Image (cartoon, rainbow, N blue to C red):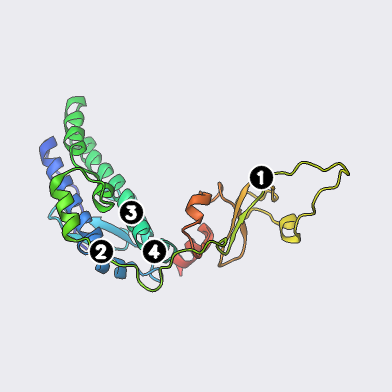
Amino acid sequence: MEAVTAPATHKTPEEVFNDFKGRRAGLIKALTTDAQKFYQMCDPEKDNLCLYGFPNEGWEVNLPVEEVPPELPEPALGINFARDGMKENDWLYLVAVHSDSWLLAVAFYFGARFGFGKSDRKRLFQMINDLPTVFEVVSGKATNFKDQAEIRNNGSKSKSNGKISRLSESRPKGIKMSPLPEVDDESGEEEEDDDDEQGAICGACGDNYARDEFWICCDICERWFHGKCVKITPAKAAHINHYKCPTCCTKRARS
């Protein structure tokens, strides 16, 4: 893996911005012109993988560095685990958003490392903010003509492979959308809950099932979780074919 150590000498905001542009170009290349290669490298059966962009406009998918704390901020960990649980474009967009976050973290890490004051930080941010984000370029929402041309030239870059399929109108496996509480009828009788609902306990917080909350089930350990406890919303769940809870993801990474 290419070295990602921070330079030891003082740098100007313009030099840090050039580093930012190089890394950004590498990430955009991975998610557009090299999207199929990138997709294949992010096999969910592999360990935690990260997408790195380099100042020379190159990119790499690799394991995270072992040093803690690392020399530079690390990209999002385990991007490969969600690959087969989402539509290809949605997954690429999600990686793009995390890549934007990482680029800013690296740029302002350098700003702190080189002692940038208020005016230098402002100048650096203004230069960065004049560029479309990686997400805007990858999703086709960029306003920069050069970046839009790159998207048009590579419009046929990636098609969903056989493993990625559109969810049917029926509720995906492992998702329990709890109904709102019903008003009692005149007889005072309530509908009985299903046996699995009565005994369901959140695998994260340990609370019992509640009818007015969204729940999701792990397809590996078959435990139920509050959506809010595992940061899964109903909208996000609609794009998940096979959900793996944080514990099962961690077990896979360690194995």
Q: Which residue is mark 3?
A: 93
Kindly identify the residue that appears in the image at 34 percent across and 62 percent down: 49
Residue 232 visible? The answer is no
Q: Which residue position holds label 1?
A: 212
Is 147 rendered above or below residue 255? above
Give the label on residue 83, or none.
4
Amino acid at circle 1: Asp
The Cα–Cα distance between marks 2 and 3, rounded to whole angstroms, is 11 Å
> Where residue 98 appears, x then y in whole percent?
33, 50
Give the foreground label among 4 and 3.
3
What's the mark number on residue 253? none
Using the image as rendered, state which of residue 220 and residue 234 is in the foreground: 234
Left or right of residue 6, residue 161 in this image: right
Report the mark closest to the observer, 4 or 1. Answer: 1
The relative height of residue 244 versus residue 109 in the rendered view (above or below) is below
Expressed as whole percent of the image width and height from the top left, the position of residue 75 reads: 31, 52
Mark sitting earlier along the chain (2/1) = 2
